[in-house]
Amino acid sequence: MFQDTSTPAGSVPPAADAAAAAAAAPAAPLGSNSNAAALKEMGFSHLIQNYNPTNPNFDLVGAIVFVTLCLFSVMSIYWIVLNLIRNTSIRSRMNNVMKTFWETPSAQEAIRFMEEQPASEPFSKIALDCASAAAHHQRHEGSRLVEALNRSEFIDRALRQAVARESGRLENGLTVLATVGSTGPFVGLLGTVWGIYHALIRISASGDASMSAVAGPVGEALIMTAFGLFVAIPAVLAYNFFVRSNRVILARFDEFAHDLHDFFATGSRVEAGAGPAPARPATPAAPAARK
């Protein structure tokens, strides 16, 4: 008789099983190779390779921008470290130097103490210049120099010159930090704009405008902006820090210079809120020239 070929209820045909298995299998990622290549092109190492003169895709403008940012970074680090060492040294010694100078029994011993200080110590240089000016004016009493400038004016001029000189030395490098902090982001932005333009030219020449082809070169160009910010931010922070630190030291320069003027012009130190301090012996001879 006739054979029943109908599928039993609840069973799945073999063809449907194969289709379901194929659907359940993980699909291969589309464009995985191109995505990996795009990610590789976005790396910093690939960016450096493009700035190699032996590379066929060598970008001269991008290389100049990159080298400029590297120089900015080196100069910024140099002046940050140098100013940090110098300011730390000055601030750790200035109170002891001034205290010892005023507590020394005689002016000769005080000048000798200042001569023993390191050449980088600014307070000792101000004191030595003041003592030298006072001794010079004393040696030329009765001359035309004394007629033109009295003792107070002559010492005041010497102190102003000494303070201006030491203030200028204290502010060395701040112009570099300000320049790096203000121009670094714009130099990095220039590198990004030029890098995007250069990348679009390469993409246009290749004829591949897919996302994977565009993302790599454009992402690589954006690294220049990040590099510019990376260079500029520490320079700005350091500049603000050193300006504040120098303001404190400059205030101590002025305070010390006023006390020196009172002492070498009148023979006694006039302290705020107190009468004049006891006079020391006569003004010492001019200190020996420091090398």
Image: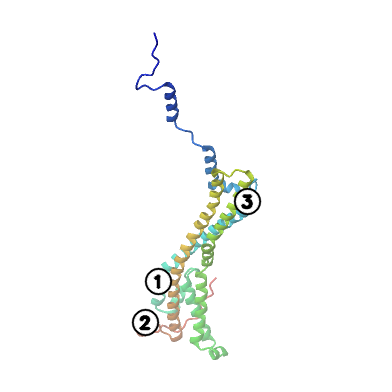
Q: Is residue 203 left or right of residue 271?
A: right
Q: Is residue 230 left or right of residue 5?
A: right
- Residue 34 visible here: yes
Label 3: few (<14), some (14–19) or many (≥20) C-alpha neighbours in 10 Å:
some
197 over 273 or under it: above or below:
above
How far is mark 3 from mark 1, CA to CA?
55 Å
Residue 59, numbered label: 3
Q: Nearer the viewer, residue 141 or 14?
A: 14
- Look at the numbered discs 1 and 2 and tell me whether their residues touch, using CB distance below 8 Å: no
Residue 95, numbered label: 1
Q: Earlier in the sequence, mark 2 or mark 3?
A: 3
160 over 244 or under it: above or below:
below
Residue 136, numbered label: none
Q: Which residue is drawn at the image coordinates 39% and 74% (left, top)?
A: 99
Q: Nearer the viewer, mark 3 or mark 1?
A: 3
User: Disc 2 on helix, strand or loop?
Assistant: loop
Color theme of the render: rainbow
Q: Which residue is mark 2?
A: 272
- Residue 134 visible here: no
Label 3 amino acid?
Asp
Residue 30 placement (x, y as % from top left): 51, 37
How far is mark 2 from mark 3, CA to CA?
66 Å
User: Disc 1 on helix, strand or loop?
Assistant: helix
Q: Nearer the viewer, residue 276 or 76?
A: 76
